[in-house]
Amino acid sequence: MKPPEVDRIAGSRAAVAARRARAEVKRQIASGERTASEVLDAATPDHPAESTLRVSELIGSIPWLGPTRTARIMAELGISPSKRVGGLGVHQRKRLREFLVERQKRKLEPGSLVVLAGPTAVGKGTVSAHIRDNYPDVLLSVSATTRPPRPGEIDGVHYYFVSDDEFDRMIEAGEFLEWATVHNAYRYGTPRGPITLALAEGKNVLLEIDIQGARQVRQVFPEARLVFLLPPSWDELVRRLTGRGTEDAEEQDRRLRTAMEELAMQDEFDFKVVNVNVPTAAREVVELMPTSPGA
């Protein structure tokens, strides 16, 4: 039977109120007003907002945990994506609480690593250079590469330009935090020493690397914040690639095919920044750091 109109309206209002209450709980976690473990402990029948919150929403509200990492954590904990906090079994609740408490002990402070990656021609180098020139408290890591310098690039400032033999030596000596062959052509690598030293000194470090390298860094530094730089549109990405005139037509086609594959990987990252204009994109990247240095 169809419920009376007054009951339907009352039910609709109750559902809206419940959603708002859960949204407020998530906001409190994201802002740091409450820890996720406190919300877990409060999830009893007397606290419906906490108990009806999905576990994925609880974990996903923790700063710096994106949807991909949340899904991986849920799988590792053996908790279904549809499970609500109040419906957890004893062992599930215990595993979840242990994870949350351990996570809280590793609160990020200055001296954190931010990785900026994205498809070819999206403007990673330009955004990174703007950060280097306008945010002196952020250390921009300088990568080594086997490709030749482009016009205006300075060795030791934009890249360390090294031979294939020297790159092989650095790999053998374990001097790279990560390295990869990009576009089936040249190799790029991040020297480990300067980054380790800067992090130990409490500095924020920005890595501007390719997506393969970002994946490697995630394995070495699980707490690194991975930022995916997006173009405003596909047409704009094509315009930027063809307009810079640094590759021939065959190379442009190959890079565009690679860019389509790279764009499909954006959900692996914690944050996304659209590069509509360089100063704004740079500011948004810096604001993702534990303390945002002033320009």
Image (tube, rainbow, N blue to C red):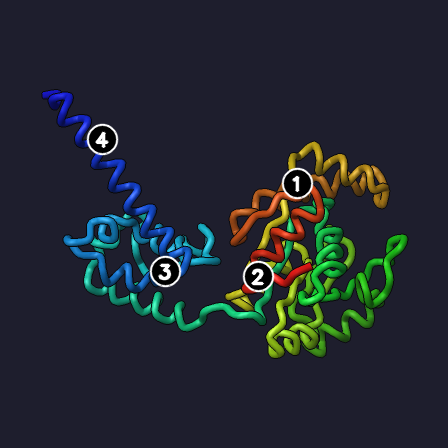
**Residues under numbered marks 2 and 4 in contact, where contact means CB atoms less than 8 Å apart:** no
- Local secondary structure at mark 3: loop
Q: In this rendering, would 180 be left or right of 111?
A: right
Nearer the N terminus, badge 1 or badge 2?
Answer: 1
Q: Residue furthest left?
A: 1
Nearer-the-camera pick, 216 or 18: 18
- Residue assigned mark 1: 231
Identify the residue under disc 4.
12
Q: Is residue 262 left or right of residue 16?
A: right
Q: Amino acid at mark 4?
A: Ser
Provide residue 152's location: percent of width, then percent of height: 89, 55
Q: Is residue 216 visible?
A: no
Q: Give the Cα separation between the discs numbered 1 and 4.
A: 40 Å
The answer to whether residue 136 is left or right of residue 108 is right
| Residue 162 rendering spot, x and y as whole percentages | 83, 67
- Neighbour tally class for label 1: few under 14, some 14-19, many 20 plus, Cα within 10 Å: many
One can see residue 150 in this view: yes
Residue located 66% across and 44% down the image: 275
Q: Nearer the viewer, mark 4 or mark 3?
A: 3
Q: Type of residue at label 3?
A: Glu
Q: Nearer the viewer, residue 211 or 199?
A: 199
Circle 3 residue: 33
Q: Residues within 10 Å of mark 2 (few under 14, many from 20)?
A: many
Q: Secondary structure at mark 4?
A: helix
Of circles 1 and 4, the one toward us is 4
User: What amino acid is labelled 1 in the image?
Assistant: Pro
Q: Which residue is mark 2?
A: 289
